[in-house]
Image: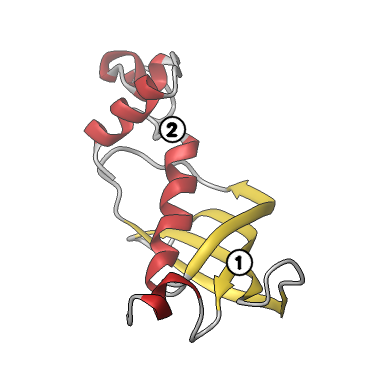
Amino acid sequence: MSQAENADEALATLNQAALHYDEHYAGATEFGRPLVVSTLTLQRAVGMGWKTFGRRRAILGFASIRLTSPVLGGDTLYAATRILAVADDLADPDCGIVTGEATVTRADGTTVAEVTYDQSIYRHDSGPFAALDY
């Protein structure tokens, strides 16, 4: 997670908290460096799941979001998702609903976020993937 990405996210989302982009100010806080905007950490948690859930149609909702430790510019993040439940998607027979819990860690193993969310996933021979022969 680069500090440039962090500053861009803070400004793009109109987050004016100097803690996210002003290194001089952030240096005087308990963090010592700019703190990554929490929505950017959440984006990474869900986005890194694309490798596992590459046939995702939509995120349906978030049951819980826990930010357990600060993320600073320059931190390397990893995510692993545990499947909690699967169900038929009653609104779309081409999809199933998967509830997953993503755990995001820094390179040192510290957990920085835990996110539980529901997503609609295309079934194997369904959706645009099947139509495009992916």
* Residue at 48% across, 56% down: 46
Which quadrant holds residue 52? bottom left
Determine whether, in the image, residue 89 is placed left or right of residue 49: right
Considering the image in quadrants, where does the N terminus appear? top left
Residue 34 rendering spot, x and y as whole percentages:
34, 28
Determine whether, in the image, residue 88 is placed left or right of residue 74: right
Q: Foreground: 91 or 52?
A: 91
Q: Of tags 1 and 2, which is closer to the observer?
A: 1
Q: Earlier in the sequence, mark 1 or mark 2?
A: 2
Marks 1 and 2 sit apart, C-alpha to C-alpha, by 27 Å
Look at mark 2 in the image and give the residue it sits on. Answer: 37
Residue 123 rendering spot, x and y as whole percentages:
55, 81
Q: Residue furthest bottom?
A: 125
Determine whether, in the image, residue 118 is placed left or right of residue 34: right
Please tell me whether mark 1 sits on a helix, a strand or a loop. strand
Q: Point out which mark residue 120 bears.
A: 1
Q: Is residue 8 above or below residue 2?
A: above
Q: Is residue 122 above or below residue 71?
A: below
Please tell me whether mark 2 sits on a helix, a strand or a loop. loop
* Residue at 43% across, 13% down: 16
Q: Residue furthest front?
A: 131
**Amino acid marked by disc 2:** Val
The colour scheme used to paint the residues is secondary structure
Which quadrant holds residue 130? bottom left
Residue 128 rendering spot, x and y as whole percentages:
43, 70
Q: Point out which mark residue 128 bears.
A: none
Q: Foreground: 114 or 111?
A: 114
Considering the image in quadrants, where does the C terminus appear? bottom left
**Amino acid marked by disc 1:** Ser
* Residue at 64% across, 60% down: 116
Q: Is residue 103 above or below residue 37?
A: below
